[in-house]
Amino acid sequence: MNHNTSAEKRRKNKLSTGHRLLFLAVCAALCLMLAMPAFSTRDDCKGYPVTLLMDKDYFPSLSKKIQEARKEVVIAIYLFKTNGFPASYTDIILGNLAKAQQRGVLVTVVLEKDERTDSFINDENAATAQRLKKAGVAVYFDNPGKMTHSKLAVIDKRFTFIGSHNLTQSALKYNNEFSVLIDSPDIAKKTLSYINNLPR
């Protein structure tokens, strides 16, 4: 009995340590990605509330922030795959963006477009773009000459989502994915600058 208890404790400690290391790795990567010469990365990464969004945690968190948005939602995403089914997670996100636009929030989405004529990414993003445009959302495609593999969302120039989640049913519901939500106007400002400077 004691042997089983000790083994369980070791397993839990191992998981806890793994989550801490993963969190530190994500924070370090975030600092590197968002660092700009005019700012100190050490200062930028201190004191900001960070929420870990593992696997299915991302969808309700992003949905809630879009629903609460008052002024602006900006998304830059590699793949946004909708299918027209109201119950699918990605179509719920699309619906949230449409409703935000209708209540006066400025919604902008930047999507990947590559040079191949037979690209699955191009087909899916183009279909979603049409649905977004129909709802009045401003949609842009990146320059086909360089891949935009970012998964970014900035809401009200304060909340930044960054990580591995694409906007697909698989990523939002089934995959092992890891992202973070950061509550920081400074990080939001730098992320918006990055998105606005993407070649289109």
Image (spheres, helix red, strand yellow):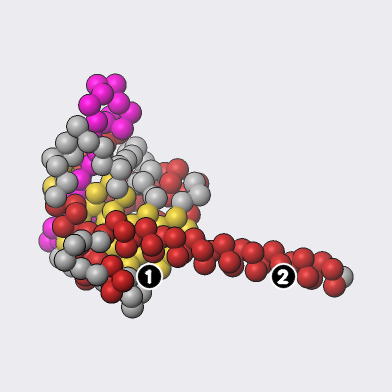
Task: State if disc 2 and disc 1 touch (CB < 8 Å).
Answer: no
- 87 left or right of 136? right
* Residue beneath the point at 32% across and 67% down: 182
Q: What residue does disc 2 label?
A: 9
Task: Using the numbered discs, state the Cα–Cα distance from disc 1 to disc 2 in whole angstroms.
Answer: 27 Å
- SS at circle 2: helix
Percent across and percent down for residue 94 are 28, 49
Nearer-the-camera pick, 165 or 93: 165
Three-letter amino acid code of the residue under disc 1: Val
- 190 left or right of 83? left
- Asked whether residue 114 is drawn in magenta, I would say yes
Categorize mark 2 by other alpha carbons within 10 Å: few (<14), some (14-19), many (20+). few
Residue 110 shows in the view: yes
Percent across and percent down for residue 22 are 49, 60
Instruction: Decide: is 78 above or below 95.
Output: above
Categorize mark 1 by other alpha carbons within 10 Å: few (<14), some (14-19), many (20+). some
**Residue 183, which numbered label?**
none
* Residue beneath the point at 20% across and 61% down: 36
Nearer-the-camera pick, 60 or 9: 9
Farthest residue, direction right: 1
* Residue beneath the point at 13% across and 40% down: 200
For the record, the magenta segment spans 97-123
Farthest residue, direction top: 118
Q: What residue does disc 1 label?
A: 50
| First-in-chain label (1 vs 2) | 2
Three-letter amino acid code of the residue under disc 2: Lys
Percent across and percent down for residue 1 are 87, 70
